[in-house]
Structure formats: structure tokens, C-alpha cells
Image (spheres, rainbow, N blue to C red):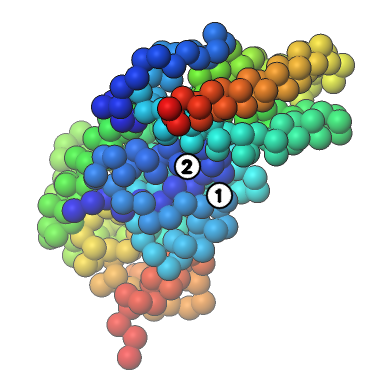
Amino acid sequence: MKISCIIVEDLQVAANYLMKCCEKSGQVESKGHFVNVPDALYFLNENTVDLIFLDVEMPGASGFELLDQIAFSPKVILTTSKKDYAYNAFQYNVSDYLMKPFTYQRFLESLQKIKPSQETISTRSGSDHIYIKADGKLVRLNNDSILYIESMGDYVKFVTTDNKKYITHNTIKNLEEKVSKHHFLKVHRSFIVNLHKIDDMRENILYIKGNEIPVSKANKADVFKRLNIV
Amino acid sequence: MNPDVTNKSFIFNEKIDVQCINDLYGNDYIYLEEVFGTVLGEYGTLVENIFQQYASHNIPGLKAAVHKIKPIFGFVGLLSMQHQCQQFEDNCQPSSPFDMLVNNYNALRHNLIASKLLIEEEKRKLELFNSQ
């Protein structure tokens, strides 16, 4: 199956070259090319893709602002002509970045970087538990025992039904792909919740065993879709 | 992009890095002609933005405008221009007096105009080459 992607790039020659690389690889299918963040966001509100080729510096909003606003977590490959995005790239869990112009060979290497983790997602996401590294050991957490996961910068906090808190080095973006889609949903840039543990919801706040979890505007529609509202 | 298309008789302007062109496109001169055409299509707007930002003494805007055009030169093998853009960007510090940029800007402006003529000429040569 081909990897679906969009290209967000305001330089036409770069976008065309990227499309040609996608076509030539036979591995990637471009679903669209957008020259600015609002147009890409409009598309992504209605569609999902596996991968975004993303320019950073565009007129108006930057590429990172797009990542802040989308409700799901596709793989991201930055296409840039600046080397100093390493910190942001790490924060946003970017898979790779391509310095323009890049060779076709370099493009293929970049695709290789996103493939292994895609396979990992499919095999892990159906599991009834996860293991996390905490307190110098691997701790097994059953899905049913997790209330929610909260971002703490480069770390995340797992809060469990027995009121324990486990802090581990990871990101919400990475975890979103690894936890069971049946149990968990990202409701905010900083929160993944166990859908089976929600007590109630008022305005943009979810209540889970006395904990208040904010729901972002971008994720609200997904939350409503997943709640069993009758 | 298509290494099967072979014709080694095309002679590029000496300012164009042939190795860079080969790395990006192989011997696909049809596509290369398209690339030069696309670059020319957006060149005017990008250069005009640089001129406007300079005229309004907007250093961050000028830096962003030069940054935006920079990769274009890589796509057509004008690596010295790409390098000059990078150097100019590095000099565009908001804290620096605007006057410090004048000499570098004039040199950049001159080369931006000359590069357009060069790209146009190469495009014409490629058209002719591909039509033979």
C-alpha cells in the first residue's frame, strides 16, 4: 500500500520536484500540494494522510503552526533550506528533514526512516497493554489501568487508576501512535485520555476521576465522534 | 531524474555546477528545461520581494525574502548564488545598522539580475537542445 502524503510548500519548483520524486518512487501518493498553512489545514480538517512534506518558512503561518493545529499525527518530513530547526524538529517528532534541493537518493533514504515505525504502529496498537521505562525498569501498564497521559516537555506522565504516576521520557505525539486506538484518544496537544474512563464533559473540559483534562478546539470533533452519545 | 536519457553534448554555462545538475536530474534534459522554466516563472516575484523589503529597510523581511529565493539557485546549479544568499542572510541581523548591508546588497542585487539572464539563456539553450 502506498504512503499517502501532502506537500506544503510555497516554492513551485521545489513542490514539483518533490511530486516527481514521489511519483518515481512508486511508494508515495501525493493527495495535494498547498502553498500555505491555512489551505493545508482546511484539507486536513476533512482528510487524513500518512505523511506531510512540510516547508517551514512560508508567508503567514509557519509549518510548525500547522502541526500545532491538526487533530492527528502524521509522519512529517521537513523540506527546508535552513539547518537550525533541530530543536523544533525534535519537539514535533519530525521524522527527517530534507535540505533543498536534495537528490532522489536522499529522498529515498528519508522514506526509509518513516517505514519501520509505521510497521511498529500496526503491530502494537492492538495490544491490551504497554510497557514503559520508569524508575529504572520496564513497567507493564494494562490499557484499563491508565486514566490519561500528560505531556511534560520531553517527558510524559502516566496517571493510573490506583492513583500512581509514572514519568517517562517520551512525547504525546509518539505515544499517540503506539497506544491502542480503541482505548485512547489525543484530546489536546498535551493529553491522551482513556476513553473508557471519562466521567463527564463540560464545555471543553473532560473529567476523569476528579482530574480536569482540556479538550482543544482542533480535537473536539474527534472526541464527540468517539464518545458513545445517544 | 531519468538516468536512461543520455546525451552528453549539452554544455552548461561555466557558472552552473554540472555535478549538482547531474546529481539532481541525471541526464533528463527535458525535465531540466521544465525546471528552468518553473524557476523563471517565480523568479520575478521572489526578486521583487527582496527589492521591496530593502526599500522599506525591513531587515527581518529582507532576510526572509533572501532565504526564500535561496534554494531556487540550488535547483539550477547556481551554487555560488546560493552561497551568496546564505552569506547575506547571515549578515541580516536586526541589531545591525542598515547601512552595513548596503555594499553586500548592491552586490547581491547585481547578481540576482545577472542570474536571471543566465537562467533565461540556459533555458533557451535547453529548448534548442531538446528540440534537436
Q: Amino acid at mark 1?
A: Val
| Chain letter behind tag 1 | A
Determine if marks 1 and 2 fall on one subunit. Answer: yes
| Chain letter behind tag 2 | A
N-term mark: 1 or 2: 2
Outermost residue, front direction? B132
For image coordinates 24% across by 44% down, the residue present is A26
Task: List x then y, in percent, for residue A65.
Answer: 54, 49
* Pointers 1 and 2 in contact (C-beta within 8 Å): yes
Vertical side of B85 occupied by A176: above or below:
below
Vertical side of B30 occupied by A166: above or below:
below
The answer to whether A63 appears left or right of B104 in the picture is left
The Cα atoms of the two marked residues, 1 and 2, are separated by: 9 Å
The answer to whether A208 appears left or right of B124 in the picture is left
Q: Amino acid at mark 2?
A: Ala
Residue on which disc 2 sits: A15
Q: Specify whether residue A157 is in view.
A: no
Label annotation for residue A35: 1
Q: Residues within 10 Å of mark 1 (few under 14, many from 20)?
A: some
Outermost residue, bottom direction? A230
Task: List x then y, in percent, for residue A16.
Answer: 45, 41
Residue A106 placement: quadrant: top left
